[in-house]
Structure formats: structure tokens, C-alpha cells
């Protein structure tokens, strides 16, 4: 049976190699066509892609973001370096910025709020009664008296003093919301940065944060990201050249990687997907996969030619034939694991999953077919292209592997691996879902964005917002004293959490109006006693203002309102605690006329993302493992095989998760794709080694010799790939994006553990436990291979 | 591994075979089950609300001795410190109305008043607060301040409310008929008493509050607080910086020319000087003559409104948009806030 499969594969490759010019031309043609498509692919971030579909929080966010402010809020802080903000220089800058922001691409012009906007008002009593008028619109204060009046008005207004002017009066905030949808974020970012640049100076420091700015920075570094990508590829080439010392050993893996990338990106474009700049690391990961497969084939080819196979063609066929099974298994299992990610209902992850699956599958052509076909062109005789020979070093390492497996040390290795598994497995439970640190984990802590974020959160109540909708059952529900007092008590309850810097709602405004009506007496700073009284207070507040100015707090018929909570950070822990507290409060304090709906704004949608990831985490890992087990079980027709191959996967995952927990890298929408891909990544190397052992057993019954031979053969390929990839991944550390540096380290760690388990742990396991599907048994002995006819 | 079991015969081998072939099925089943049905549960940290929350405002503060301080405020909140304001503990009041005033006889007995005619009394240092009934009325009965003279407690409020309790707050009776005018404060020196309220209203009693006479004042702005250093010399303060001074037991009042437009909410005789606090952090002081006033701030950069200031030992306690402690070096610390 074995031999018949071998025969079929061999014949297929003989066929391919006979028409190799045609095959290569066909691949080249497709690559050209795909290359054209790939060159059209858009690299950008679409915010709506980051939001989980069908999640109740996201639905609330989408429904109410127009009125209560969505997740694309940008906060700009103007800080006076000396004195307070109440001088004409600073205020003029605030005014100019407020006006200019209307011209920025994608800005929701109704949601530009600052001291100089029409929306920030004061309610004051005068001889004509109570009036509500903008604080500093349309005119700046003309003289010192007006400046003093403005200052007094700010101090008196808790909707401004605190949320929009810092308590030490040294800083003021401009907030602006952006529309979702198809806008040019790079342009918006550049326009924003130009405005920030214009506003800076003259003793004013300007700082800016918000998701659109964050992703603007990511796009800003896109060029650098691509540069690093190409440097990493170049490093790969150099290392391959150094280690393999042959042209084919250098060029063919690179060709495999490139063809795969072009095909995958072209296919992505055809599927109508765009490429998120943050997933470039994922691209590198799959390219690594392609290269690894190609290197195995080449190493085998070199082996065959080294052992005196006459023609390049025969060696190429032998290499393809013998490695067909493990490569096929590696690719299919990997593709399956990547596809599992699509179960997470977040469009970005689904797109990555689909692109990733296609990408992995293209390796079938780019490495599995193209490499042997191309190899058949290279001469059978080895000709080295440079004199540096590190082969003895490789052999020394592989010799060490063999020495460990064949001596008592194997028990030490197995014991250590078991201990590492248990310890890292327990520690891995510290892995956090969501961001694990304040600021954005995408950028370095000392990046200007994260420094700006820290400063703004120090001066103000918090730049990340969440709104909780208070949905009335009837129009006018928000005038009911019961609803309003429930809202203020809710705010108080939420503010007990230290990360919640403050909150605002209609329940804060009406007491202010009431106080103004009562000659400014704070003893009357309280809600009205009846719906009618509250209705009157609301009328006082909106009278003389534009329709819609009240929208941030409640809609026109007082049916739906919002409590906006300001967060100082959006760590996973913070968000989870806040959401759980909202639920607690709502459960303990039901109200008759309204209900609380979670949750909108950035923190609201992040809560949704984190919940989806948390809920899907076990599912994703378990199903990926299941895919792997099923693939192995089917391939080796043994259930034991499935479990056996889980061992390196589990080990590399627990160790990587522990590393993430230790380094404070959270499981979030940006790290999840890498983590998911990593599940499948860990096992390829083991496939090659185990298949090598099995293949050697076809020639002789000596398990020990089979293991040593496998280590010296496929083991060398594993070592070459791991060394080159790990070294080139290190380059990601120079990225200005912390995320990419972190992911680079993660990938390196994965590759290292996978290579280590393939070279040290798995051979020892085979030696000690002698699984039937590898070494055979009395009843099912390994068939002895007939010498394969070459020619 | 299987080989080692050979010597136990076929049975043992069968068991091992069964185990090694069923274990993978169990694992696959387990994975499937985990993948489809197991959902991770998030661990959520518990948040214990601090005794004084950021949003709390306080209207009244009472310090029966230099260590014990009570403060009452919005949402029915009463906090107590037993170490001169270093730490505070929340007390259970069973009311959610805003408490506007508090007064204490000693570290055990105290009374607090607030909106909706709520009066609560404690005899055990605030471990339990009990509601006291006040005379029924169809009006809102919002009570602003409570003052004590011996065992008598006086509470003032909306709709001309002037309530008197002879027994440390247990029972209450009306001392004046209701009228559409609020009383904001009351002060006694011996049998002489003074009552101030809306629209510049001022009344005087010479018989311990049994009867009251209107006194004409030169102003129409609401008076918020009144204090006397002896039976002759007193000061009343009010909205838009109003400041009235008397030197004849409140028969005639002179208006001190306004030096601020900010509201003044509280005045007190502070061992040798007059001390008034009000809106946006203003603090006014004068010597015993009460003719030369200095306008200052409670502390630099502090703009909170203050409805009462009380001295205990070397410290002042301030109720207002927050609860603050002013020590003898002039440093202000806000209770419950990390930084100022």
C-alpha cells in the first residue's frame, strides 16, 4: 500500500518534471496575473472590521453612536506651559482648531466639542430670566473682564470644569468624533497632525489621542514595516546562502515564499479583502512556513545527490516522493488550524483567517510542486558558492541530539519537558484577554502617542469613553425623578472603580440648572421632584440652543439617554470589571420606566471584542487541536498519532502563552491571529522527523539507528529553517510598532520550541514509548521497502 | 511500552491496548466538547466603594471635639472621622435624600436634617441613625440647617419652617407658622436668638425663641448664615457677597460695602476673628470689629463652593462640593481625593 502511494506520487512528479518548462511557465503566468491583483490590494484599517458582528454591545453602539459619540473619538489637549488657559493666545488656538477640524476628512461635524464650540454652554440667571448660551462662541473674550467672566463661568460649570478644562486650569480639551466607513485615514491623520503642529508653540503644548490617531500612527509606520519585512527577507536569503552554500538552497525557498505571498495577496484582492497593516507579521509567519517546506525538500535533494543518485531529476523525484506525506500533512493541518480562526465573529479575524488559509494552501504549489520541479534543473553535483562551511557545527548540534536520545539523558529531557509543560501550563492561566497595560500595546510605552495618552489621562477624567444607554419605555421617561436619580446613583457606583475617571449624564445637568434657578444656591443642586419640574429644567437648558445640542445626554422626546463614563485606560481588566459592575448595578436596582443597555463608545466595543475573544479562546484552541488530531489520525491511520503530535503543539502553546502572560502581552484582536496561526505552526518540524524515522524503519528494524538517521537527515532541514527564521525574525525588534516587535519575539519563541521539541523531545518520546504507528508492532510490522526503481 | 506488559499475559495487554486506543478518542471527544460548550469565565476584581466618593458633596459638618468629626451631604450620606479627619467611615442612615445640616452634642449624640423634612438622630455615635417625626405639612419641608443650644435643637428650612426640639432631636414642634419664605440659619447666645432667610429677612428673639420679631435690614438679597460672638456683636452673610454687621444685639444692621460678588454661605466666630466662606473657594476674614474685611481663598487654586466651616482643635473642616480639611499651616486636603 505504502509503495502504491509512493508510486503514484512518484509518477505524478515524473510527469510534472517531464513537462517542467510548461509547469514553470504556468506557475509564472498565474503569478504574474496574481501579482497584478496583489499590487492593487489596499493596505488600510477599517474600524468596523474590528467590531464583532451581532454582539449586543456593538448593536447598541451602532444604533446610538450618532448621538452619544462612537468609538472613533479623538481628544486633543492644549496645555498652557505657563499660567492657565485663560489668555487670548491659548483660547484663539482652541477656537482655530475647533473651526479647522470641520475640514478634516471623515469628521462628524456635529461632534466637535470644545470651549469654542457652540455646544458648550452655561445656563445663567439674568434679569430677563434664565438663559442658556455658548460659553465662548462665536467670539473670543475681548478683554480681561470678559476673560475673567469666562473663567468664572467655567469654574461654575461641572460639565466643563473637569471634562473640558482640567481642574488646575492649565489644560483644555477638544474632542471630535469620526465617522466610520470608507474614508482615507492616512489623510485624516496627516490633516490632524498638521493642525496639531499649527496649534503647538507660543507656550502651548498640544497632545492628541484616539483610535483614528492610533491607527494613523500605524499607517504612518507602514513604510517602515515594509522595509523591515524586506530586510527580514534579505536576512533570510543571506542566511540560507551561508548555511546551504548553494544557489538552489538560497533561491528556491525564497521563490516559494514569494510565489505564495503573491498568490495569497492576489486571491485576497479577488475576494475583495484589504490588508490590515498590523497583520504584516502574520504574512511573515506564513512565508516562514513556505520557506520551511521548501528547505526540507532541498535538504532531502542534497541528501539524495550526496548519496550518489545519478541525476538531478531522480533526486528531485525522490525528494518530492519521500516528503510528500509530511509536507502535505503539515500544510493541510496548518490550513485547518488557520481556518478555525474564522469562527470568531470579528470580520478582521475572519478576513485574516481566509487569507491565511489560502496562503497556507498555496504552499502546495509554491513549495511542494515548484521546488522539486525547479530542483530538477540544478546539477546533481554539489558546487559550493562560498568557502564558509558551517555544516560541521550543524552536525555537532545534531550529534548532540542523537547522543541525548540514545543515552539515559533522554529521560532527563522528557522529565524536563514534562515539568516545563506543567509549570508553563499553570502560569499560562495568567494570560489576559484585552490589553494588559495602560496606553496602547501597539506602540512602545515611550512613543509620543502613549506619552500623550498618559498626559491627557493625568489631566482629565479619561480619554476612553463608554456610554451606557438608558432606554426609556415611554417618551418622557428621562424626566422621571426615579430614572434620573437611578442614573446619578449608577454614576456614583461606577466611579468607585479607580480607573473610571468620571461620568456625565442628564442627571448631572438638571441639578446645575436647578441651582442656577435658585440664585446659584448649591443647597438646591438637586434633581426636580417631579417629571414636570425636570421637564421645566430641561427646557431651561435647551432654550435658545440648537436642536440636537442636548443629544449627547438625551434625545428630543426624552425617551433614550446616555450615561457616559470616562476611563483612564482600556486594559482588559478595567473593562471587564466595569462591565461586570454595570450588570451588578442593573440587576440590583431595576427601574420601572427604563432599562440600561450596554454599551457604546470605544470601551463599549472593546468590551464586546474582549468578550468575543474570551468566549472564543477555548473554542479556537480546542478546535484547532481537534483539526490537528483528526489530520494526524487520518494520515497515520492511528488515533495514537493524533495524540502524539499534540505534545509539541501543547508545549509550544503553553510556553508561548506563559511568555505573553509574563511580558504583559494581552490576547487581543491584534495578537489573536498570530496566536491562532502558531497553534498549527508548532507541529511541522515534528512531522518531518517522525516521518523520517518511519521511513528509515522501512529499511531496517533498528529503531535507534532510524532515529539517528532521521535526525541527521530531516533534522538538518529543521535546524536550517529554525536558525534562519529565528535570526531574521529578530529584525522585527527594530520596529517602531511594539506589537510587531512583540509578535516577532513570539514567532521566534514558537519556532525555537517547535524545533527543540522536534529535535530533542519527540525522538526521545519515540525511543521510550515506541508508538505503534511509527515503529510498528508484532501484528502490524513495518513493511520493508523494496528498493525504489529510479529512472 | 507494550512489550513490558507481555509477561502479564494477553489480558493485561488487552487492557493496555484498549486504554491506548480509547484515550485518543476520549481526548478528541474532550476537545470537541471543550470547543463547543466550554466558555471561559472572566474573573472580575471586586471594587469596594470608598467612604467618600468623588461625586459626594457635603452641606454640613459638626465637630463635637477635636478628634470626632461628622459630615452630612448629598444622597443621605454621613461620614465620621475619629482621628481628626485622617480617615473617614461611612454611616448607615437609611435615607437617600440630601442631608443639609448636622449638629452634635458630643461624640455620641447628633442630629441631621435634610430634604423632604427628614430628621435623623443618633445616640450611639452614628452606629445607628433613627428617623424623628416632624409636624406634618403639605409643603416640601426642606430643612437647611440644624443648630443646638443646650439640649434644644433648632432646625430651619423652606416655607418658613422653624422647628424646635427640647429633647436632643427626639420630638419636634413648630416655633413659627409656615410662610412662603425660607429660613436659612439661626443663632443663639443665651436667650437671644437671630433667624435669617430669603429676601433679606431677619428675625430676633429675646426669650430663647418663644417669640420672634421682624428686624428691618438694608438689603434684599437672601441671607444664608448668621453668627454672634456675644449677645451684642454679630455678622450675617448672604448671596452676592452680602455682609451685614450689628453691634447692638441685632436691633440695627449695617451693610458692609460688598467686596465680592460671590455668594457667602457660612459665617462663624473663630476665636478672635470672623470667618466667612462661600462660592468658588472665597474666604473672607475680619477682626472682632467686623469693619475691615479681607477677601482671600480657602487655599490657592481651590474653587469649590463651601457651605460650612467648623473648627476642631487646630484644624478647620469644610463642607461643600467636597469635604476638606484645612490645617494650621494653610494646607488644604480634600478627603477622599488622592491629589488636589
Image: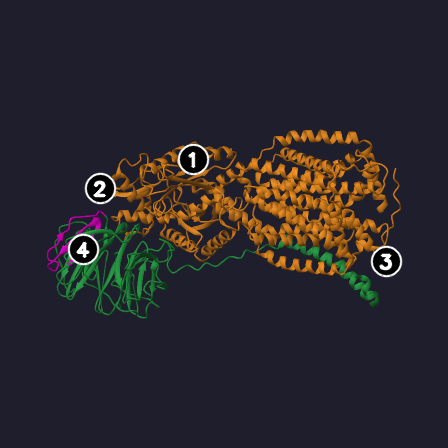
Q: Which residue is mark 2?
A: A127
Same chain for marks 4 and 2? no
User: Considering the image in quadrants, where does the C terminus of chain A appear?
Assistant: top right
- Number of numbered discs on residues: 4
Q: Which residue is mark 3?
A: A778
**Distance CA(mark 3)–CA(mark 4):** 108 Å
Marks 1/3 in contact by CB < 8 Å: the verdict is: no
Query: What segment carries the magenta color?
Result: B234-261
- Choose between A227 and A58: the one closer to the eye: A227
- x, y percentage for residue A156? 30, 47
Which labelled disc corresponds to residue A197? 1
Secondary structure beneath dot 3 equals loop
The quadrant in which residue B48 appears is: bottom left
* In front: label 2 or label 3: 3
**Distance CA(mark 4)–CA(mark 1):** 51 Å
* Residue B160 horizontal side relative to residue A20, left or right: left
**Distance CA(mark 2)–CA(mark 3):** 106 Å
Chain under callout 3: A
Which chain shows up in orange? A
Chain under callout 1: A
Give me the residue at 82% from left, 66% from top.
Answer: B11
Amino acid at each position: 500500500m505504502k509503495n502504491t502511494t509512493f508510486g503514484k506520487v512518484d509518477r505524478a512528479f515524473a510527469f510534472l518534471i517531464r513537462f517542467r518548462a510548461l509547469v514553470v511557465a504556468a506557475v509564472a503566468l498565474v503569478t504574474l496575473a496574481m501579482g497584478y491583483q496583489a499590487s492593487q490590494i489596499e493596505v488600510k484599517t477599517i474600524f468596523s472590521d474590528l467590531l464583532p458582528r451581532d454582539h449586543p454591545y456593538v448593536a447598541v453602539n451602532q444604533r446610538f453612536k450618532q448621538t452619544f459619540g462612537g468609538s472613533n473619538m479623538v481628544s486633543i489637549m492644549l496645555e498652557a506651559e505657563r499660567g492657565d488657559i485663560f489668555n487670548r493666545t491659548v483660547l484663539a488656538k482652541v477656537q482655530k482648531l475647533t473651526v479647522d477640524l470641520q475640514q478634516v476628512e471623515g469628521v462628524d461635524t456635529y461632534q466637535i466639542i470644545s470651549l469654542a464650540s457652540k455646544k458648550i454652554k452655561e445656563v445663567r440667571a439674568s434679569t430677563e430670566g434664565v438663559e442658556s448660551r455658548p460659553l465662548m462662541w462665536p467670539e473670543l473674550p475681548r478683554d480681561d473682564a470678559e476673560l475673567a467672566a469666562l473663567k468664572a463661568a467655567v469654574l461654575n460649570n461641572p460639565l466643563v470644569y473637569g471634562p473640558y478644562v482640567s481642574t488646575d486650569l492649565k489644560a483644555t480639551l477638544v474632542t471630535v468624533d469620526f465617522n466610520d466607513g470608507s474614508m482615507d485615514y492616512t489623510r485624516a491623520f496627516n490633516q490632524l497632525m498638521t493642525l496639531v503642529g499649527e496649534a503647538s508653540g507660543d507656550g502651548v503644548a498640544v497632545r492628541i489621542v484616539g483610535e483614528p490617531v492610533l491607527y494613523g500612527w500605524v499607517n504612518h509606520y507602514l513604510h517602515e514595516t515594509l522595509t523591515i519585512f524586506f530586510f527580514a527577507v534579505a536576512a533570510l536569503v543571506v542566511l540560507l546562502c551561508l548555511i546551504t552554500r548553494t544557489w538552489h538552497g538560497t533561491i528556491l525557498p525564497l521563490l516559494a515564499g514569494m510565489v505564495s505571498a503573491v498568490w495569497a495577496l492576489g486571491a485576497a484582492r479577488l475576494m475583495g479583502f484589504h490588508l490590515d497593516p498590523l497583520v504584516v507579521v502574520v504574512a511573515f509567519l506564513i512565508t516562514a512556513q513556505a520557506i520551511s517546506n521548501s528547505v526540507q525538500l532541498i535538504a532531502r535533494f542534497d541528501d539524495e545527490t550526496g548519496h550518489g543518485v545519478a541525476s538531478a531529476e531522480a533526486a528531485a523525484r525522490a525528494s518530492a516522493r519521500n516528503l510528500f506525506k509530511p509536507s502535505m500533512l503539515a500544510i493541510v493541518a496548518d490550513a485547518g488550524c488557520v481556518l478555525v480562526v474564522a469562527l470568531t465573529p470579528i470580520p478582521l479575524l475572519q478576513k485574516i483567517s481566509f487569507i491565511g488559509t489560502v496562503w497556507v494552501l498555496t504552499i502546495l504549489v509554491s513549495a511542494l510542486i515548484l521546488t522539486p520541479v525547479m530542483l530538477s534543473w540544478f546539477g546533481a553535483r554539489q558546487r559550493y558558492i562560498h568557502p564558509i562551511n558551517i555544516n560541521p557545527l550543524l552536525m555537532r548540534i545534531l550529534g548532540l541530539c542523537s547522543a541525548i536520545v540514545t543515552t539515559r539523558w533522554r529521560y532527563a529531557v522528557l522529565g524536563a519537558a514534562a515539568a516545563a509543560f506543567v509549570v508553563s501550563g499553570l502560569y499560562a492561566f495568567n494570560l489576559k484577554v484585552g490589553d494588559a497595560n495602560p496606553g496602547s500595546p501597539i506602540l512602545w510605552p515611550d512613543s509620543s502617542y502613549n506619552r500623550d495618552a498618559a498626559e491627557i489621562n493625568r489631566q482629565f477624567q479619561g480619554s476612553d469613553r463608554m456610554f451606557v444607554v438608558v432606554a426609556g419605555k415611554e417618551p418622557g421617561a428621562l424626566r422621571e425623578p426615579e430614572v434620573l436619580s437611578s442614573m446619578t446613583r449608577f454614576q456614583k457606583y461606577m466611579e468607585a472603580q479607580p480607573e473610571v475617571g468620571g461620568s456625565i449624564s442628564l442627571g448631572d445637568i438638571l441639578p446645575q440648572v436647578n441651582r442656577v434657578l435658585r440664585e446659584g444656591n448649591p443647597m438646591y443642586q438637586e434633581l426636580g421632584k417631579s417629571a414636570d419640574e425636570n421637564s421645566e429644567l430641561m427646557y431651561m437648558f435647551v432654550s435658545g440652543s440648537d436642536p440636537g445640542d442636548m443629544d449627547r445626554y438625551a434625545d428630543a422626546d426624552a425617551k433614550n439617554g446616555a450615561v457616559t463614563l470616562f476611563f483612564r485606560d482600556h486594559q482588559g481588566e478595567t473593562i471587564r470589571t466595569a462591565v461586570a459592575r454595570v450588570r451588578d448595578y442593573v440587576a440590583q436596582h431595576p427601574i420601572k420606566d427604563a432599562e440600561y443597555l450596554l454599551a457604546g463608545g470605544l470601551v463599549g466595543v472593546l468590551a464586546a471584542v474582549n468578550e468575543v475573544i474570551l468566549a472564543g479562546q477555548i473554542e479556537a484552541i480546542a478546535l484547532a487541536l481537534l483539526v490537528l488530531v483528526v489530520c494526524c489520525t487520518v494520515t497515520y491511520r492511528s488515533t495514537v498519532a493524533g495524540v502524539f503530535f499534540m505534545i509539541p503543539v501543547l508545549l509550544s502553546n503553553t510556553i508561548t502563552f506563559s511568555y505573553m502572560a509574563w511580558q504583559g502581552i494581552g490576547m487581543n484582536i491584534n495578537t489573536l491571529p498570530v496566536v491562532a496561526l502558531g497553534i498549527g505552526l508548532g507541529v511541522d518540524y515534528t512531522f518531518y522527523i517522525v516521518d523520517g524515522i518511519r521511513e528509515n524503519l522501512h529499511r531496517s528494524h533498528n529503531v535507534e539507528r532510524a532515529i539517528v538517521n532521521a535526525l541527521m537527515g530531516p533534522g538538518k532541514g529543521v535546524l536550517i529553517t529554525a536558525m534562519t527564521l529565528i535570526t531574521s525574525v529578530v529584525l522585527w525588534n527594530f520596529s517602531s510598532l511594539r506589537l510587531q516587535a512583540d509578535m516577532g519575539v513570539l514567532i521566534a519563541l514558537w519556532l525555537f520550541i517547535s524545533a527543540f521539541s522536534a529535535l530533542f523531545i519527540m525522538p526521545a518520546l519515540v525511543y521510550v514509548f515506541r508508538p505503534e504507528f511509527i515503529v510498528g508492532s508484532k501484528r502490524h510490522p513495518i513493511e520493508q521497502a523494496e528498493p525504489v526503481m529510479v529512472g | 511500552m507494550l512489550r513490558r506488559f507481555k509477561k502479564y499475559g494477553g489480558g493485561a495487554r488487552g487492557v493496555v491496548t484498549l486504554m491506548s486506543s480509547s484515550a485518543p478518542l476520549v481526548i478528541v471527544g474532550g476537545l470537541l466538547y471543550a470547543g463547543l460548550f466550554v466558555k471561559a469565565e472572566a474573573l472580575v476584581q471586586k471594587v469596594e466603594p470608598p467612604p467618600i466618593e468623588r461625586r459626594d458633596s457635603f452641606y454640613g459638618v459638626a465637630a463635637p471635639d477635636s478628634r470626632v468629626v461628622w459630615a452630612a451631604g448629598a444622597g443621605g450620606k454621613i461620614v465620621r472621622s475619629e482621628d481628626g479627619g485622617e480617615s473617614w467611615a461611612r454611616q448607615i442612615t437609611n435615607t437617600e435624600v440630601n442631608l443639609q445640616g448636622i449638629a452634635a452634642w458630643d461624640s455620641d449624640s447628633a442630629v441631621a436634617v435634610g430634604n423632604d423634612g427628614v430628621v435623623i438622630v443618633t445616640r450611639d455615635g452614628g452606629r445607628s441613625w433613627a428617623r424623628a417625626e416632624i409636624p406634618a405639612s403639605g409643603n416640601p419641608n426642606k430643612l437647611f440647617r440644624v443648630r443646638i443650644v443646650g439640649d434644644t435643637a433648632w432646625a430651619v428650612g423652606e416655607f418658613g419652617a422653624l422647628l424646635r426640639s427640647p429633647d436632643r432631636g427626639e420630638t419636634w414642634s413648630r416655633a413659627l407658622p409656615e410662610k412662603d419664605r425660607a429660613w436659612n440659619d439661626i443663632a443663639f447666645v443665651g436667650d437671644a436668638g437671630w433667624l435669617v432667610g430669603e429676601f433679606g429677612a431677619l428675625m430676633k428673639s429675646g426669650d430663647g425663641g418663644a417669640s420672634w420679631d421682624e428686624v428691618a435690614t438694608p438689603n434684599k438679597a437672601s441671607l444664608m448664615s448668621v453668627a454672634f460672638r456675644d449677645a451684642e456683636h454679630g455678622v450675617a452673610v448672604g448671596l452676592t457677597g452680602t455682609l451685614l454687621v450689628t453691634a447692638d444685639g441685632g436691633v440695627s444692621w449695617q451693610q458692609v460695602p460688598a467686596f465680592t460678588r460671590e455668594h457667602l454661605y457660612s459665617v462663624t466666630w473663630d476665636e478672635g476673628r470672623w470667618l466667612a466662606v462661600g462660592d468658588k473657594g472665597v474666604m473672607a476674614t475680619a477682626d472682632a470689629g467686623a469693619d475691615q474685611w479681607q477677601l482671600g481663598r480657602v487655599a490657592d487654586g481651590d474653587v469649590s463652593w463651601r457651605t460650612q466651616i467648623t473648627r476642631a482643635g487646630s484644624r478647620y473642616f469644610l463642607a461643600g462640593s467636597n469635604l476638606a480639611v484645612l490645617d494650621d499651616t494653610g494646607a488644604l486636603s480634600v478627603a477622599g481625593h488622592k491629589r488636589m
